[in-house]
Amino acid sequence: MNLRLSLITAALLPLFGASVTANADDTDLERIVVTGDFQRESIQTLSASASLFSEDEVNLRGATYLDEMLGSTANINFASGASRGRYIQIRGVGLRSQFVDPINPSVGLVIDGINYSGLGGSALLFDIDQVEIYRGPQGTRFGADGMAGMIQMQSAQATSDPSLKLQVGAGTYNSREAGLAASTGLTDDTSARVSYFRRKSDGYVDNLYLNKPTQGQDEQVARFKLNSQITANLRTELNLHYIDINNGYDTFALDNGRNSVADEPGEDNQLSYAIGLNNTYTGFDLFDVNLSLSAIDSELFYSFDEDWVCNDPSKPQLCAAGLHPGGYSSTDVYSRDRDDQGVDLQFKSKTGNWVAGLYYQNRDVDLERQYTWLASPFNSTYETNNVAVYGQLATPIGPKTTLITGLRVEQYQGDYTDNNGFIEDTDDIMVGGKIALEYQVIDRTMIYTSITRGYKAGGINSEALAKAKDEGLNLDAEFFKQHTSFDPEYLWSGEFGVKGSSLDDKFILRLAAFYMHRDNIQLKSWQVQDQKFTGYVDNASSGSNYGLELEGSYQLTDDLLISGSAGYLNTKINKFVTKAGLNQDGRDQAQSPKYQYALSARYNLTNELYAMVGVEGKDDYYFSDSHNAQAPNSNLVNVSLGYEADSWAVRAWARNVFDETVPTRGFEFDNNPLDGDADHTYTYTQLGEPRVAGVTFTLNL
């Protein structure tokens, strides 16, 4: 179970940690294993700030998708530039949306060893054993996809003993779900597991013009896993994934409410097929060899009603004027075909003190955009190839001290073409790495300090290319000619951490302090003319991000567990002026609340019956780097009541119990048709999850 701690408890924990010396090899704590530093180790010995969600935690919250869990983590935020919160920021760094331009993710996503970075809609949680979230640059391990951090999800292992899991649930907004997973041994050396899950919901938006819900969710995922010990020295694991998401996207309204009047509501769909093959050979005397192969084929469809309103003269009260002067009907539709292939060849010492590897990835994205104001569809192709060599060495420099040094050198090439006749390319060589000192104060208390460097590749501003071709906007065209591409961003991070626990594991602590410097920071900007938008990525001079992170737990009594997390984050942008002339020098970076917290208490009423209540919140923050609209602070309450028997459990749960309004995406415009006032700036928001509740039944045989 992921373990968190309140601030007051955290202040006391070092006293307890310093007074115990027993070995913890047999505790549950030591079995909380992560793989962020090239090896399987306890989260308490990892020289990095990390959070972990177990399957139990997911069930307690009634969560089916990753964004429903992120409120309980320190310094992690998300933006819903789609039907789900699939754009994640760690310590204030991360994307918020994707439209025309090809993007390189700042926060990567790996599921069963398959790189889903940039495909955040894939983060469905059924039959996921563990979710690991790593904060800070992951330059040595993950390269260009992990500049801000990384998320790893691991599905349940195939077992030789037959097992069966059944999950069914129902909840508010006509939500219903069903999942089935089964595992069995096929031979003495081979095991298989198969799972399938589907969830449907009407969503949280009612379209008054169409008289139906238009933000519905229909999500399904199937996974197949095959583990085989082919010989005494060769083990292989095969993973097959199928993801099919068909969600509505109809979120914005002039009154910022949950009632839409759009006549052409959008969609947010993803169809992905993925395969991963992981092979490990242990027959050499000095090292083991691991070869991982993966491929993903995805079809992505994203659309929205750009004017947000209906255009029906027969219903003048319902179909009022939209944002655009004079009124018009407009839609924007993006269809992407994406193909990924990856190869990772890794050599690891028998003692686990060094690792070296070669990595190759190809990503090919074909885009078709159908936009009302384009004479014909826009088509582009963006192919990237990155090749990397990496290595890490752990060197004991004393009986309790270990020096870790890691380095990764990566070449990232991008080739872009479109039907406007533009041919552009990028070719960047980037270097990342890690230097860390780990000091085991006593058996159950470790401190560490590290310097890490991460990076994100440069790219192409395809919208700026199209704008530069527009002969009717000569001044803008000249500006965008200078912004057809952008340079790589680098992130340096210094971190100090303390991790410890008491002898009986009643107190557990993870504390990290960090300072990050962003060099050549990539920021999204917009040029707005006649309420039409041109987006582009620009490089600012630099940025700084520093703060604290705390997680832990306190077993107050045999029946009462208190757990929590807290984060403090201070960010700044240096020397950045938007196209509209807005000077953002010294302002906080987008999606960076100053504080976040979560505190929960679980009480066992009997051996089987429990009750849990939790509260989580965050400070206000800016939606974007190109305008100053803000999300307000929020404080949400979650509850759960359940009965857990040996082989089955039933849970009643509710999130956002008091139905707080929480925006998750925001834009700023200079007009509001509802009052006819064009002299003020107005903020329009996409709302996050309202109060939701449900009942879930799980059977494990």
Image (cartoon, helix red, strand yellow):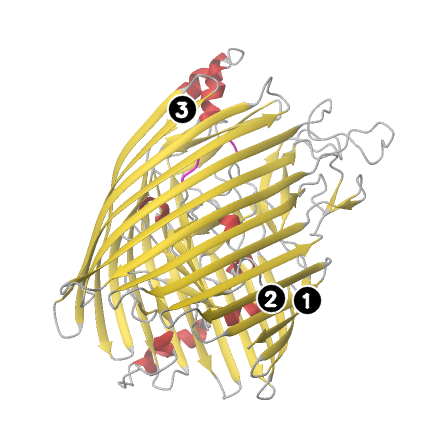
Residue underneath mark 3: 484
Mark 1: secondary structure: strand
Question: At 82% across and 36% down in the image, what residue appears?
Answer: 318
The answer to the question of whether label 1 and label 2 lie on touching residues, with beta carbons closer than 8 A, is yes
Question: At 48% across and 44% down in the image, what residue appears?
Answer: 590
Residue type (three-letter) at the residue carrying disc 3: Thr
CA gap, disc 3 and disc 1: 49 Å
Where is residue 492? Give x, y as percent: 28, 48
Q: Is residue 552 visible?
A: yes
Q: Quadrant of residue 285?
A: bottom left
Q: Is residue 589 visible?
A: no
Q: Tell me, for residue 180, which label it has, or none.
A: none
Specify the segment rendered in magenta: 99-104
Residue type (three-letter) at the residue carrying disc 2: Gly
CA gap, disc 1 and disc 2: 7 Å
The answer to the question of whether label 3 and label 1 lie on touching residues, with beta carbons closer than 8 A, is no
Whether residue 102 appears in magenta in the rendering, the answer is yes
Residue underneath mark 2: 62
Drawn side of residue 604 relative to residue 138, left or right: right
Mark 3: secondary structure: loop
The C terminus: image quadrant: bottom right
The answer to the question of whether label 2 and label 3 lie on touching residues, with beta carbons closer than 8 A, is no
With respect to residue 26, does 472 lie above or below?
A: above
Where is residue 250? Give x, y as percent: 67, 42
Residue underneath mark 1: 694
